[in-house]
Every structure is written in structure tokens, then in C-alpha cells.
Amino acid sequence: MDDFEISVTVNGRLYKRRIEPRLLLSDFIRHGLGLTGTHVGCENGVCGACTILLDGLATRSCCTLAVQADGRRIETVESLGRANNLNPLQRAFWQMHGLQCGYCTPGMLMLMTELLRENPNPDRETIRLRLNDNICRCTGYEDIVNSVERAVELMREDKAVR
Amino acid sequence: MAQVGKIHSPPAGRQKERPDQKLNVIGTRMLRKEDPRFLAGRGRYIDDIALAGMAHAAVLRSPHAHARIRSIDKGAAQALPGVLAVLTGEDAAAETDPLPCFANPPVVQRCIAVGKVRHVGEAVALVVAESRYIAEDAVALIKVAYEPLPAVSDMMDAINSRGDAVLHPERGPDNVAEHRNYLFGPVEEEFARAVHVVKRRLRWSRSGAQPLETAGAVASFDEGSGKFTISVNGSMYNYIGFTIATALKVPSHQVNLVPVDAGGSFGSKLFLHKVAVLAALGSRAAGVPVKYIEDRIDNITSCDNHGSDRIYDVELALDADHKMTALRYRVVDDYGAYFQYGLGTHGNGFSQTVGPYKIRAVGAEIYAVFTNKCQQGACRGFGSEVTNFMIERIVDAAVAELGLDPIAFRRDNFIQPDEFPYQIPTGNLYDSGNYPGALDMALQMLGYDDWRAKQQAARTEGRYIGIGIASCQEKGVFSATEFWMLNRVPGFALTSSPESASIKIDPTGKAVVSLHAPCWGNSPETVAAMVLAEQLGMDPADISITYADTDHGLPGTGPGGSRYTVMVTGAVTGAAAIIKEKLRRVASHMLEAGPQDLEFRAGKIGVKGAPGLEVTIAEVAMQAHFFRLSLPDDPDLTSGLEASYTYDHPLATLPKSDSDFGIFYPIMGHMCHMPVVEVDVKTGQVNFLDYVAVHDCGTMINPMTVDGHVRGGTAQGIGTALLERFHYDAKGQLLNTSFQDYLIPRIAELPSKIRIGHIVTPSPYTEYGVKGAGEGGRMVAPPAVVCAIEDALRPLGVEIDTVPVTPARLRALIREAEAKKRAR
């Protein structure tokens, strides 16, 4: 198979790579770029562990070809806060026990990043409705909902400080 | 035969840290140490490992449930550019021995099938290639000629299978893997005396843990030393990891197993042997490091860890006062194609086979059968979740048949708080508990009477609301001694199930704790840091945690059987005691005071009655590490400050006989769940209106993470009750091999809030009185939810004996009930 050259902006950095057309975006991100924060759970687009933002939209990277990302902008979990400097959403997950094994977490964070950009003040039902896109096997989701509600508060506090 | 009831001279325990002391760190809602790396996408899971020159493996899997392999043509696959090795079962068998099996006699399972495939998805060939993509291309080029054999899918048929339908003819003429009859107490006499006998047939369908991360391994074989280094996301490597070396036909010191973060397990990664052996085999053949990660189809069809799959015929004997006296059951359990843990999932249930009730005798006839399915392994509860379902279903049946009050009936039959430690008919001991207290708390939290009133009102509007009740046990801390009595001839009659911790305090007073089992999402780092912080008055931020591989590991059984927090707490406490002794001796020279006159203050050691006369742990650590000549010439005062401790099971005794297993699983948690559901009778949809969960796991190290386990376990239990089932058809084809049709609960299928209450009855046998909490939710939610659905549909007379109760299944039951009504 002939390789294609793509240029993709991932977390603000431009990457040019020659890739096979069949390469999945999840494999490109994880193994091509070494950004292993994005996880693969079901490989069917069902669980959402592989969720990234493609031009700002939450997207299943396991069901997307890397060539489809050519010329576009990707955000992964690595674009959020660092471990020693978590962003409000990550901090809220930490405070409210919104994760256990951590495997679905990057997908959840990206899905909720999209939601909070759209709607910085979602109510509980709105959060639940959006969370229905992804699967978590550890938490039973309730603490994730609590985390997102907490994130709304933390983001408001952060703004007030500024 | 075990004496049933309160034990008046209970066995002495080894508890050093009493539960009733004032605690500073234990019991607080400390944020987890593991989380920042996970939140930043910096966890280190198995597929995150990339080694220089690493190749990738893919597996060709059987499309047949049962077939002879006539021939394999791997020529085209081998010729594909980028392919490094193609291995068939025969190639693998030349290099490996069968995989570990704990049944006796063992059932031979090969990492790649030899001669015959026994279930859909069984490995037929392994390809190693430069990329996973090429490896999968090559898999598609392998040509296999199969000769299909009769497939066994129905477990009842399996008992009478003959000829070519027999999976393991070398073990006997049928597909009965094991048939045992256990009598604990005077079962026949109790049933002869019974005034009421309630009977039911129950069906618990096969489901599985299905963590979001599959199983995998990265292996590299070093030709120079002849040694394998294998990273794998399994556990128990510091317990029985040497059996992987046996499978690879090398001495155990030639395999180093390296732990990684696991993306969930729930039992299913308890002991991952196959992926480790496949990756290692591939690495030795290809001469490069090899990664093998199961994809979801690999995992669903061949993870070796499907859950229990049982049909029970159960009978409960009651006396004239409606006291439960005896329980008797015949159970057929479909173990699939292999039998790695033997009857382990039934032995587990024997630890709590009377539930929280004063049942005096238990009879169990067990048929374990082989069918052409993926074999069973561990799934949150290890079989005891099914025991709980069986007990609570027969209790509900008694309530319905005899017209009893579900609350009063349970209460009247409970073991009472003053009757502990309590011995049950199997010989196991319940260390402590307060079952009426948990029931009362749940009733009060739920507003039980209010819900009953709402239920009545709703019925007049044609709405079907139901309240479920389940009071169940959560056995904690397995001892493995029950395995003796499960094999006809005890195989390897072990009595150890230890856990270790190593602590090193560096010259600046910071601590590193090494654990000897992996992180599964169960916050072992947080637990270890909290216990050490409690012990030494340190700041938990000054403690970091590492995980020892098998080259450096001490005995560690690992998470499983709701044991890890209890055991890590014991191990860290033991190691800290050694550290404290040395700190005291060194400080005594620094402070020129007798060791007996010193006390530990927050992060310091000081002279009793002399505030301010003290040294910090950091000062003592510096002294211990670098100033040997300032200390007396005592051979015990070696330089440095480190300790290791191996904590053995807190309370276990030798098994006595087939009718008295001794004490093997005594740290007894308890839970009472009360869900309120509304059933839409037109669609069969079940919606949760409320959910109360009261748990008792003794002293809680971290209430936040306990609540997380309760919620998550309950969610899985609801999945088991309502959705999850591996659907094999009559020919042994697995019809749902992806998450599109194997349904895992999403948020919409679950209660929006699970209201949690805690009863605390500390264990008298463990450090600080901690009990297990990891499995409880899944061990109680299925009977609680089914009870609620049945209660909702009481006006229709629907009886539920099968899980999962999918909407389609529920609609069928409702249709049947309505037809019956019309016919009347």
C-alpha cells in the first residue's frame, strides 16, 4: 500500500508523517507519536476510551483513519494539565474520585472538555446525557458526574481569581 | 463435622493495632496517590510499553467450537514481507509445556491448540511481525483444514456426552470435569424434620468482568543470559509466577515478571498465564522483543476468565416457626473447555454458604462440566456472588410461598451481633458482624415505609414499582486451604497466602514502599502510604510507592478475594514496626535516653514527658545512613534504614475433612442493598427510582475509595442482573463478541444515585480491624435487583429465576403471566 503524507497538529505541535492509509488514528497517536494517554478499549467505537478532540469535536480515534486527520487539529489528554499541574477538570476528577483504574479516564476527560466548552454550566442531567457516550467499568459513573459538577465550580473559582 | 454457632473459646489472633485507637490518617478521605499520573495520561499500561526493535504478535483463532485440526499451511503467511515467525500448536508444544492448572489431576491446556480446538476463539497459530497490521494480514493467510466434531453447548447435555463430543477423553468417557457431594452437618435429618420445604430452579448465566483494558504482555528473551523479561498486566506473579517459567520450560530464575498498571481487572487478570507465554514464545522464536495485546474479540472469546454459569436446584428447610434449618442444592456449572481453578469458585462459596443466617446444615452436590466455550476464571466474587444469589432467591421464594414479611423473616433468622465469632457448617468462621444493624440502617435510609406507601399508590395508577431487599456476605481474605478439599486427591496442598511490603527510609527521611503485587485500579499506593503515614507520623506526600518484579519480589499473593487492603495494611504495619524499632534505638543514642523512654510524635521521636527534647525522623535517618561510628558497636545496628515484612493470613486453620474445611475465609464483610425500581410492563425496561447500599467492611482505611468500590461493584452487579451474558448458540458459536452486543451498563441503565451507609464492625483479627470491600457490590446487587423487579410485578405473579433479566426476557415473563391470568 502506498504511503500518504499527512500533516496534523496534535496538542499544538505540527507533525508531518508518511503513513499507510489503513492506519487507525488511535494507533497513529499512540504508537506513531508516542502519546499513550489515549487508550483503546473495544475497537468498535462503543466504549469511548479512545476519545480525542478532532477540530474540537469529540471523536472515536479507534474508528477514524489517521489520513482523515490530515490538515486538522487534534487534542488529546496530554494537552490538558500535567500531573503536577492539573487543570480544573482533572483536579475535580481527583477530588471527587472520578476514576479508579484510569483506563477510561482520558476519554472521559476529552468528552467532558468538549461539553464544558459548549456549556460551561451544564446541569446534572446534561452531564449524564453526554456521559452516556462512554463506558466506565470501575466507578458506576456517579463520581464522574460529581467530578464534572465540581469542575464547573473550580473553573468558576479560577475565573474569579483572575 | 463443624460445630455450628458461637465459638466460646475463639482462636487467638495476631492483631497488634487495635481498631479502637485514635487514628490520624486512617479513616480520612485522602486523595489517591495514583490519580495525577492517570489524569495526565501518564499511567503505564501494558500497551504503552515500547522496546527497541519490538515486534508484534497476532493470533489466529478457531472459528469452530470443536474440531480436529487436520493440517495447517503457514507458507503464505511466512512469505509475507515483515513476518518474523509463524508458530502452530505443534511448533509451540515443542517449546512449551501446558499452561498452569490448579485442578488435580490437571486439565491439559496449551497456549496454542494442538490437534484439536475446544472452543471458538482458541488459539490455532501465532504470528510475529514487524507491526500488528502485518501480523493480522499474515493471520488471514494461514490455511487450516478442520474436521468439525460434535459441539457441546448445553451444560445438561455435557453430563451425558460420549465419543467425539468428549473434550478431554483422557480424563474419562464424558464431559463431567468433577462431580462432588459435600455434606456439612445433618442435612437429611433437618430436611426430614422440616415443616416447610421451599424449592426453586435457578439459572445464573455466563458473564464476565470485561475490564476496558484487555490482557497483554511484552516479552524479551535475552539470548546471552537465557533469561525472559516479561511485562504483563496480570497479578499473583510473586505467588505462582514460577509456573509461567514451567510452561516455558526454563528454570524459574530465568523469568522475570514485571508488573504494570492494569486498566481494570475485577478478577479477570488474577493470573494471566497465556498472554505471557505467547509473548515469550514469540520473542524466543523471533529473536526480538514481542508485544502481544489481546483485542476485544480475543479477550471475549479466549480470556480464560469467563464467570460462573450455573443451574441450581435448591431446597430450603424451615421449621414451624419459619426458622431456616438447612439448605440443600444440586448445581451444574458450565466451566467451558478447561478447568484452571478446579472447583475453586464453589469452594469460595462454601466460606459463606449460609449467608447471614443461622442455617445449621448444608448439602451441596456439584457437577462441573466441560463444554465448548472459553474457560471460567475469576469475576468479582469468584463464585460467591452466585452463592449469594442462590441464598437470597430461595429466601425470597420462602417469603412469597409462606406469605412472610421479607424484613421480619430475615431479621428472625440472622446470626445475632453477640454470637461472633460464629462457626458455619462448612467449618469457616465469621469473625464479626451486625446484620440487624445493617438492615435497620438500610430501612431507615431508604424510608422503607414511605416507599411501600408510594408503591401502593402507584399500583392504583397502573404503575409497577418494587422494593428489593438483599442481605449478603462478602468473604474477605482467602487462605487457599479450601482448595485441598475440592480436588478428590489434594494436589498441591498449600497453606500460605501471604503479602509483603518493603520500606526504605532514605537519608533525608523520605520513604519508598515496595509492593509485591500490581496496581489494578484498587489504590494500593494510597493504602500503603496512609498506613505508613499513620505508623510513623509522616506526611503521605513524603512516601512513594514502587512495585517489585519477581526478581526482587517477596511473597505476595496480590489483590483478589477482597483481601488486598487487609493484607497490605498488615504487611506495612509489620515492616513499619521494624523501622520504628531501629529509629528508636538510633534516636536513643542521639537523645541519650533509654529506648523505653522515647515516644513517636508527628514525624519525630521524643523523650516522654520532655516536650521539645526530640529528633526528627529525617535526622535519625541521616544518622542511621551515614554516621555509623557515632553509634555503638552493636552488630544489629547496621547502616541504613529499611525493612521488609511478610504478613501471613491473619486467621486460618488446617482443613479437617470433606465436611469440615476449617477456617479459610473468616474476615467477613456484609451488605444490605435496597433498590427501588419501576418496571415498564410494555417494554420490559427497568428504571431505578432509588438505591440504598449499606456495607460493613470493618475499619475503613479510606472511606472515599470504599464508596467508589461499592458504587462500581453495584454497577457491575446491575449489569449481571439486567444485561450481561455471553451468548453461545446450540453449536457453541459465541454470538456477541464485541461491546456492541455484549452490553455493559452505561450511565442511563444505572441508578442516578446510590446512597451509601456504613456499619463498622472491626475485625478482631486484622490490623486496625480492616475487612475487604472490593467485591461486595457485585455480590449483592443481582439478588437485590431481581427481588425488586419481582416485587414490582407481584400483581402479575411474575417469578424470576434467571439472570440476566433483559427487557426481552422480562417481556416474555410478563406475557406468560398475563396469559396465565387470562386463562384463569
Image: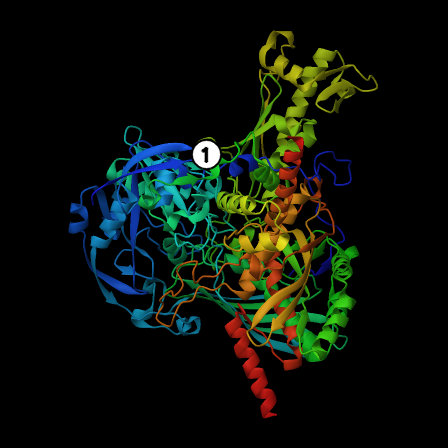
Kind of residue at disc 1: Asp
Which residue is nearer to you in this view: B98 or B53?
Answer: B53
Looking at the image, residue B593 sits to the left or right of residue B133; the answer is right
Q: Position of residue B314 (x, y in %)?
A: 58, 73
Task: Indicate the quadrant containing the N terminus of chain B: top left, top right, bottom left or bottom right.
Answer: bottom right
Which residue is nearer to you in this view: B140 or B531?
Answer: B140
Determine the residue located farthest toward the bottom in the rendered image: B824
Q: Position of residue B774 (x, y in %)?
A: 60, 49
How many numbered marks appear? 1
Residue at 51% across, 51% down: B267
Residue at 74% across, 68% down: B451
Looking at the image, residue B236 sits to the left or right of residue B66; the answer is right
Q: Which residue is mark 1?
A: B549
Determine the residue located farthest toward the right in the rendered image: B609
Residue A111 lies, with reference to residue B499, above or below; the image says: below
Q: Quadrant of residue B19?
A: top right
Residue B531 lies, with reference to residue A49, above or below; the image says: above
Task: Indicate the quadrant containing the C terminus of chain B: top left, top right, bottom left or bottom right.
Answer: bottom right
Which residue is nearer to you in this view: B197 or A81?
Answer: A81
Q: Quadrant of residue A31?
A: top left
Residue B512 lies, with reference to residue B410, above or below; the image says: above
Q: Which of the chains bears the disc numbered 1?
A: B
Which residue is nearer to you in this view: B65 or B640?
Answer: B65
Q: How is the image coloured?
A: rainbow
Residue at 73% across, 67% down: B410
Res B619 seen here: yes
Q: Position of residue B364 (x, y in %)?
A: 56, 67
Q: Position of residue B107 (x, y in %)?
A: 38, 57
* Label 1 residue SS: loop
